[in-house]
Image (spheres, helix red, strand yellow):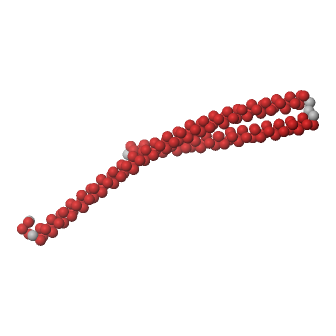
């Protein structure tokens, strides 16, 4: 196969597209890990803050301090809801990115299959040519032997 062959060009372009899709998928996965870690940190902080509120209430707390605690917990709840929404969106992007990568991989596999079939076809044609050449050489040798053995055939 020639380097400038259109099929090789398609294979190279397809490989680059697959690799780019793979990098995008990896970025989405990293973003998902970051978002999940942020969500977990917010949930843990909320749990700890609620525990502090319980402890403060057991000791006795003013209504203003209770309002502050509740306002901050609502603020944390909002941040948690936003982080959960961001995580859900991130997971949708991961699914789309994974599908895109799979499509590019299937396309590359198809082109590679075509190239392998073509290479096999060319190999078989070369073998046929070699057999024909070998048969011709063998026939020429036999014909020379026969003419050497029987000079009247010449």
Residue at left offset 90%, top offset 28%: 63
Q: Residue furthest toward the bottom? A: 149
Q: How many labels does the image show?
A: 0
Q: Can residue 126 be seen in this view?
A: yes
Q: In this view, does 111 lie to the left or right of 52?
A: left
Q: Is residue 28 left or right of residue 117?
A: right
Residue at left offset 72%, top offset 38%: 39
Q: Is residue 91 left or right of residue 101?
A: right
Q: Residue furthest toward the right? A: 60
Comparing 26 with 83, the one in front is: 83
Q: Is residue 17 visible?
A: no
> Where residue 99 appears, x then y in whole percent?
53, 39
Comparing 43 with 119, the one in front is: 43
> Where residue 62 appears, x then y in whole percent?
92, 30
Residue at left offset 65%, top offset 35%: 88
Q: In which quarter of the image is the C terminus?
A: bottom left
> Where residue 94 appears, x then y in whole percent?
59, 39
Residue at left offset 43%, top offset 47%: 112
> Where residue 13 appears, x then y in whole percent?
46, 42
Residue 147 figure quarter: bottom left
């Amino acid at each position: 196969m020639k380097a400038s062959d259109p099929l090789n060009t398609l294979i190279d372009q397809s490989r680059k597209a697959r690799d780019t899709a793979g990098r995008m998928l990896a970025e989405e996965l990293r973003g998902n890990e970051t978002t999940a870690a942020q969500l977990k940190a917010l949930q843990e902080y909320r749990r700890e803050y609620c525990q502090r509120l319980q402890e403060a209430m057991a000791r006795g707390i003013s209504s203003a301090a209770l309002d502050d605690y509740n306002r901050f917990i609502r603020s944390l709840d909002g941040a948690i809801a936003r982080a959960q929404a961001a995580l859900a969106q991130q997971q949708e992007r991961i699914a789309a990115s994974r599908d895109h990568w799979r499509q590019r991989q299937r396309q590359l596999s198809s082109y590679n299959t075509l190239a392998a079939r073509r290479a096999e076809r060319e190999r078989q044609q070369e073998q046929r040519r070699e057999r024909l050449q070998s048969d011709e050489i063998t026939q020429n040798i036999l014909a020379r032997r026969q003419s050497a053995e029987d000079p009247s055939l010449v």
